[in-house]
Each structure stands twice: as C-alpha cells, then as structure tokens.
Image (cartoon, rainbow, N blue to C red):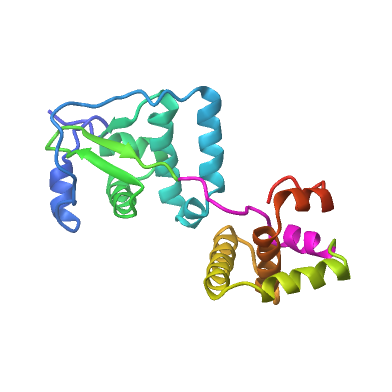
Amino acid sequence: MEIDKETEAFDEEALAREFEGAEDTAPEEDVLEQVSTLLSPMDYIKTLHQTLDHPTFRQLPAHQQILYLQFLRHGQGEGKSRVRATIAQMAQWIGRTSKNVFQTRKQLVKAGLLRMTVKPRQFSTGQFEVKLLQPLVGSQLSPMEMAHRLDQFTAEDLVVLDQQIRTMDAKGRRELHEEVEQTCLDLQKSGFVLPDGTREKVFQYLAYIRLTGKWRIHSRFPDWTDY
C-alpha cells in the first residue's frame, strides 16, 4: 500500500541526525504546560506591534521572522505560554519544506527567541516557549526629531548647555558617552542611516535631557511630551 506523502508522520529525530546532529535542548518536561498568558486581544496586538518595530526582529532573516511570528500567533495569540507543534505543522504555517523549517527553528532556539521545553521524539510532538522581545529602554526619537528639537535651542540655551556639560564629572561624562553609543546603535538597528554629526547632536540632546530638570524642560518646550 502506497503511503500518502502529505499525511506521512515526520521523524524529527532522524532529521536531527541527518542535519548537524541532535539539537541542544533544555531538560525535558513530562507535563504539557499551557499556562494562560492572560493577554487581552488589545495586549496581543500591542505585543505584535512592539515585535514588528523591534530592532532585533528587524535584523532577522525573513524566514526566521515568519516562523517567530507564527509561534507568537499560536502561543500568545491564543492565550498560551507554550506551543505544541510538529515540524510538518510548522512547514504548513510558513509554506516551506520540513528540512528548511527544522533549520529555521534551530536558528531561533540558538538566538534565544525560542526555547524547547519538551524535546520531540520519533513521531512525537515537541513543545516550545516563545521568548518575547522586551521594549527598548530609552529615547525612541529619530535622528531627525532630535535635530529638530536642537534647532529650537536659542544661543542662550546652547551657552547654558555648554556650561552644564563642562561641569559634569568624569563618571557622568563616561556614562553619557555610553548612552550616546547605545542610542546610535539602536537607531542603526532600526534602519536609520546616521549622517555626519549625528553623534554630536545625540550627545547634546541627551546631555540636555540628563542635566536639565523636567519642569524646566516643560516650561521651556511645552510641546516636548517624551524625553
């Protein structure tokens, strides 16, 4: 009797042996865990938007992005913290071959975006936990917006800012430079091309935000709502 290739059970263990050996996995859990994440539909949409805008997600190759989003959909999107799925099911999710999906899943595990909580056995389904991307801490302003705000400074504002920068201690100056580098790195990860002079403008902007009290910022620039 001829076996229907579309419904044939998929041997994940054999595939793992064929492609770079067995996968690294966390200790196996005997009980399927499906703890509700208690996400409302609006919370899930917010999580999805944060994921799509996150620099780490944007840097992933397209095939990894699609599989990660599918795990997010079948997990948090359905109110679950863990997802049971076979390689064959994942292949159907994203329209790729089982071998390709096996490698993509392995890449997500290695990147720390997916955790295997129950190891797949021969003709048995594995269980996975999606690692959510945490919102970035710090300014989410674009270089153009920062430049626009600096353009609002008067000559007097810049003189006061220069005096504030000059009085900074070595530790504060070092921390500020580290914050500037991290901000520029986040902007580049988000797809921005930083023109010449961007780091200097970011330094001025962050120095102003750090060294000036919020009440003074608001009284000087009432339209600044995030800083």
The reply, left or right, for residue 35 in relation to residue 32 is right
Q: Position of residue 63 (x, y in %)?
A: 42, 50
Q: Indicate the position of residue 92 as horizontal and vertical percent values.
A: 36, 35
**Image height check: is 153 above or below 81?**
below
Look at the image and tell me in which quarter the N terminus lies. top left
Q: Quadrant of residue 5?
A: top left
Count the labels in the image. Answer: 0
Residue at 52% x, 50% y is: 136
| Between 8 and 61, the one nearer to me in the picture | 61
Q: Position of residue 58 (x, y in %)?
A: 52, 53
The magenta segment:
134-151
Give percent across and percent down for residue 15.
18, 48
Q: From what the image shows, is residue 175 above or below residue 84?
A: below
Residue 33 is drawn in which quadrant? Answer: top left
Question: Is 137 in the magenta?
Answer: yes
Q: Is residue 194 magenta?
A: no
Tell me which residue sits at (41%, 43%) in the image.
68
- Can you say whether 171 is above or below 75 in the image? below
Question: Horizontally, is 113 left or right of 140 in the view?
Answer: left
- The front one of 133 and 151 is 151
Is 225 on the left or on the right of 191, as rendered? right
Q: Residue at left 24%, top 41%? A: 116
User: In percent of the image, x 58 and y 68: which residue is there?
Assistant: 176
